[in-house]
Image (spheres, rainbow, N blue to C red):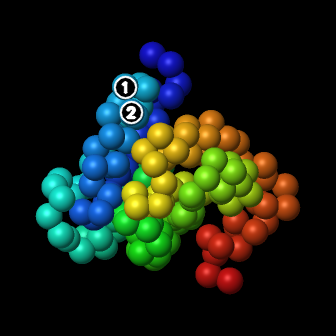
Amino acid sequence: MDSKSKLCFALGTDHAGFSYKEAINKFLLSSGYETKDFGTFSNDSVDYPKFVKPAAEAVALGLCDFGIVLGGSGNGEAMAANKIKGVRCALCWSVETAKLAKRHNNANVLSIGQRQVSIDLAILIIESWITEKFEGGRHKRRIEMLDSDM
């Protein structure tokens, strides 16, 4: 078993990100990762906090290593995820924003807007974010400030 098969990803979305969540889940599983799907499970209109918060909580509690949340724009989903202490959710729309989210912010949750990027780009964003490494250094101090009550 290689090391990446040990990584688990929490997934959460509303109806506007449902089809990407399904495709991303298949991609992650076929790449040897584990997933926990917190829904939603159809295109029927739902309220995103009901699905995004449990996914973010799974990351904060250590039940999953990382999270991916989705919606139409990804904005509300990032806001909901960032309400959970210990979560650093980054809204990404390009490979570069995903790399920087990991390098500089050590983002443990990624938010993507299904109406903003193609599924091919979404997968590239995820691949880049997964493989990128946190730089530490001056960024570590800033992350510690985020994680504290300042």
* Quadrant of the rendered image containing residue 9: top left
- Residue at 52% from the left image edge and 44% from the top image edge: 121
Q: Which residue is under mark 2?
A: 27
Give how far across and how far down residue 72 sits, in percent.
Answer: 37, 66
Q: CA distance from mark 1 to mark 2?
A: 5 Å
Give how far across and how far down residue 57 sits, in percent.
Answer: 38, 63
Q: Element type at marker 2?
A: helix
Residue 67 at least partly seen: no
Q: Amino acid at mark 2?
A: Phe
- Residue at 28% from the left image edge and 44% from the top image edge: 22
Of residues 18 and 115, the one nearer the viewer is 115
Q: Element type at marker 1?
A: helix
Give how far across and how far down residue 13 sits, in percent.
Answer: 31, 60
Q: In this rendering, is residue 120 above or below 58?
A: above
**Which quadrant of the figure contains the C terminus?**
bottom right
Residue 142 disc label: none
Of residues 3 and 40, the one nearer the viewer is 40
Quick check: 70 left or right of 93? left
Q: Which residue is under mark 1?
A: 30
Q: Amino acid at mark 1?
A: Ser
